[in-house]
Image (spheres, rainbow, N blue to C red):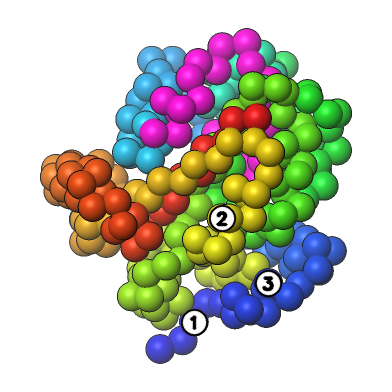
Amino acid sequence: MGTNRILDPEEAERLNISERIRLEQHLMDSVLVNDRLFKLPETWRFDDYMNQSPWKKHQFNFLGSLEDKVVLDLGCGYNPTSVYFARAGAQAVIAGDISTKTLAYVQKMAGINNVEDKISVLLCAGETIPLATNSVDIVHGEGVLHHLKLKDAGKEIERVLKPGGKAVFKDPLGENPLLEFARDRLPYKWKHAAKGTDRPLTTKELKQLKAHQFHCSCSGFCLTGMLARAIWGRDLSWPQFIFDRLDRFLLKNFPALQRYCRYVVTCVTN
């Protein structure tokens, strides 16, 4: 069975920051994006987004209210999260990414959702964030840490966060060999066409973040829940609800199972 990896994880780890950025820029700029931009209905509530999955609920319960906060949406990609944060009451949202194409897309999306006054864009990598020290209240990253040099990224996250500021990240976890085989070798509907510097995180790598001065905790999510999503898809369904409740029981009572989960949520307090 073929793989969609351009580089294996060991080769990706050996890339320097400039090489990583060039490869990821090429991949992100090559993505075909639907020209129909995402517009939120007037009835939309942030809780609707937050309650889509156990890991989102965990992330945003940790962050607390976004009201009047300055938020850095690091590695924003083609996602609507910056718009969500602006609609949730953030004072300012900085959408950061290495691709000018993704940033242009976010700007257009901000315009049709009438939050262009709250959202600015920033061309940057996670290891070199051109923002002032102690300038943001919250850093959010969806699937970004597993592309980065964590030692360097950790320093920058610590630097730009205000004292008492928080950061939260959700990334693929790479401790489950069966899951890694599926990620690399098996076809599924939402699989990316090509992977560049993706390296699902390991316990060893996460220790690089925990070595910084800030407080850092990691929690695994989606153990049996990955079966429900593989069979019934990612849309909310009753099998997902059942498997998510089973996960909650298993991971609370047998925390060693967390390393075999699909995702890890990393919570940081500066």
Residue at the spot 84% in from the left edge and 64% down from the top edge: 18
Q: Which residue has dot 2 on it?
A: 206
Disc 1 crowd, CA 10 A, few/some/many (<14, 14-19, 20+): some
Helix, strand, or loop for circle 2? helix
Left or right: residue 187 versus residue 266 is left
Q: Quadrant of the N terminus?
A: bottom left
Residue at the spot 20% in from the left edge and 47% down from the top edge: 253
Helix, strand, or loop for circle 1? loop
- Camera-nearest residue between 152 and 204: 204
Q: Position of residue 63 (x, y in %)?
A: 51, 25
Q: Position of residue 164 (x, y in %)?
A: 64, 21
- Camera-nearest residue between 81 and 216: 216
Q: Which residue has dot 3 on it?
A: 13
Disc 2 crowd, CA 10 A, few/some/many (<14, 14-19, 20+): some
Q: Quadrant of the C terminus?
A: top right
Query: Closer to the N terminus: mark 3 or mark 2?
Result: 3
* Magenta segment boundaries in residue numbering: 58-81
Residue at the spot 49% in from the left edge and 41% down from the top edge: 217
Q: Which amino acid, by three-letter code, is at mark 2? A: Leu
Q: Which residue has dot 1 on it?
A: 3
Left or right: residue 22 versus residue 119 is right
Q: Which amino acid, by three-letter code, is at mark 3? A: Glu
Give the Cα distance between marks 2 and 1.
26 Å
Q: Which amino acid, by three-letter code, is at mark 1? A: Thr
Rendered view: 245 above or below 164? below
Residue 40 is one of the magenta-drawn residues = no
